[in-house]
């Protein structure tokens, strides 16, 4: 192997490789590595991917011999917690716009349903952010992990998973702001645009960017269905859900003359579709950890 090329690939991968390990190839998007082919000292060749690494699903043989789903294992505690929180948040956003719910409870209760849902989203998003922070520094699951303050807050600009998790967490904070503002009475049209519609738009943009990055990560820089496991399905569902949320935000823009919503039906439909996609994707998180983990 050409030594300068191997060194460059090792540096770009940003992993602490054990002695004797070499990087055969890397792929990804721009400066981000989403997939790498590694050779162990014993000559075996394995595949590393960013999503599997942060979720501690293990390495896979690079020849694809175990790329199909293996035996069912116990789901990880983190995947269950994140899945449950995202599902609860999605359920709130799904039921909130429903006409039967709006007619059964007060307008205030509907508004607070979205607030509660946004808090669930933020809690789950922080767990996902922390998942990226505590990923092992080496290719194996038993490698060292960051310690101290870096387990709570850290900046990893060379990693696509850190960007996806950070931007999504920021998006949930925007949703916290917009949903809480919607519970306030006697806001002027200008205040509603500033504190309800604008954060909704920013949050939707964050979700769309984060979901696209997560989709790129889950695609692992490759083509073909062999790369499209449960993680890819989750990322694809979240991307569709984020697009639906974006449509909802655009449809909810305020008309200058009246201050009324531009298209309430489309806004509600986008929210419901997005929430349904997020709910299914969240439900698949424990499935991914139970079914896609390497032996």
Image: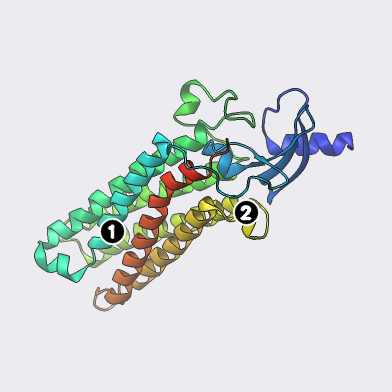
What residue is disc 2 on? 227
- Splitting the image into 4 quarters, where does residue 244 fall? bottom left
**Kind of element beneath mark 1:** helix
Q: Which residue is mark 1?
A: 93
**Front residue of 70 and 57:** 70
Instruction: Name the residue at the right extreme.
Output: 2
Snapshot colouring = rainbow
At horizontal 62% and vertical 30% (from top left) the residue drawn is 140
Q: Which residue shows up at 62% across the image and 59% down it? A: 225
Q: Residues within 10 Å of mark 1 (few under 14, many from 20)?
A: many
* Secondary structure under the numbered disc 2 in the rendered image: helix
Between 193 and 148, the one nearer to me in the picture: 148
Residue 71 visible at all: yes
Mark 2 or 1: in front is 2
Q: CA distance from mark 2 to mark 1?
A: 31 Å
Residue 60, numbered circle? none
Q: Residue at x 45, y 54 (%)?
A: 206
Q: Quadrant of residue 98 in the image?
A: bottom left
In the rendered structure, the answer to whether residue 228 lies left or right of residue 238 reads right
> x, y (%) of residue 238?
45, 57
Q: Split into 4 quadrants, where in the image is the N terminus?
A: top right
In which quadrant of the rendered view does residue 24 lie?
top right
Q: Judge from the rendering whether residue 127 lies leftward or rightward of residue 294; answer left or right.
A: left
* Residue 43 relative to residue 174: left or right: right
* Image quadrant where one finds the C terminus: top right
Q: Residues within 10 Å of mark 2 (few under 14, many from 20)?
A: some
Task: Establish if 120 lies above or below 237.
Answer: above
Query: Which residue shows up at 24% across the image and 75% down it?
Result: 260
Whole-percent x, y for residue 133 in the image? 51, 33
N-terminal label among 2 and 1? 1
Question: In the image, residue 207 lies at what x, y percent?
Answer: 44, 55
């Amino acid at each position: 192997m050409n030594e300068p090329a191997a060194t460059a690939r090792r540096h770009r991968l940003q992993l602490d490789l054990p002695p004797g390990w070499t990087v055969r190839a890397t792929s990804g998007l721009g400066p981000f590595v989403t997939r790498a082919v590694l050779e162990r000292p014993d000559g075996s060749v394995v595949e590393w991917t960013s999503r599997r690494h942060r979720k501690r699903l293990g390495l896979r043989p690079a020849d694809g011999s175990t790329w199909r789903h293996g035996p069912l294992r116990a789901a990880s505690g983190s995947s269950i917690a994140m899945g449950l929180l995202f599902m609860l948040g999605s359920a709130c956003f799904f039921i909130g716009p429903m006409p039967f719910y709006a007619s059964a409870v007060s307008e205030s209760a509907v508004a607070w349903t979205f607030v509660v849902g946004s808090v669930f989203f933020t809690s789950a998003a922080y767990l996902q952010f922390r998942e990226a922070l505590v990923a092992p520094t080496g290719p194996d699951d038993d490698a060292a992990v960051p310690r101290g303050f870096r387990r709570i807050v850290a900046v990893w600009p060379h990693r696509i998973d850190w960007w996806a998790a950070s931007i999504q967490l920021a998006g949930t904070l925007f949703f916290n702001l917009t949903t809480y503002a919607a519970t306030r009475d006697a806001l002027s049209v200008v205040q509603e645009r500033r504190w309800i519609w604008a954060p909704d738009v920013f949050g939707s943009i964050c979700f769309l960017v984060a979901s696209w990055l997560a989709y790129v990560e889950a695609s692992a820089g490759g083509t073909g269905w062999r790369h499209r496991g449960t993680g890819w399905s989750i990322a694809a569902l979240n991307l569709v859900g984020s697009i639906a949320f974006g449509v909802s935000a655009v449809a909810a823009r305020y008309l200058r003359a009246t201050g009324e919503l531009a298209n309430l039906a489309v806004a509600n439909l986008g929210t419901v579709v997005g929430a349904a996609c997020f709910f299914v994707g969240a439900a698949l998180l424990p499935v991914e950890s139970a079914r896609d983990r390497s032996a």
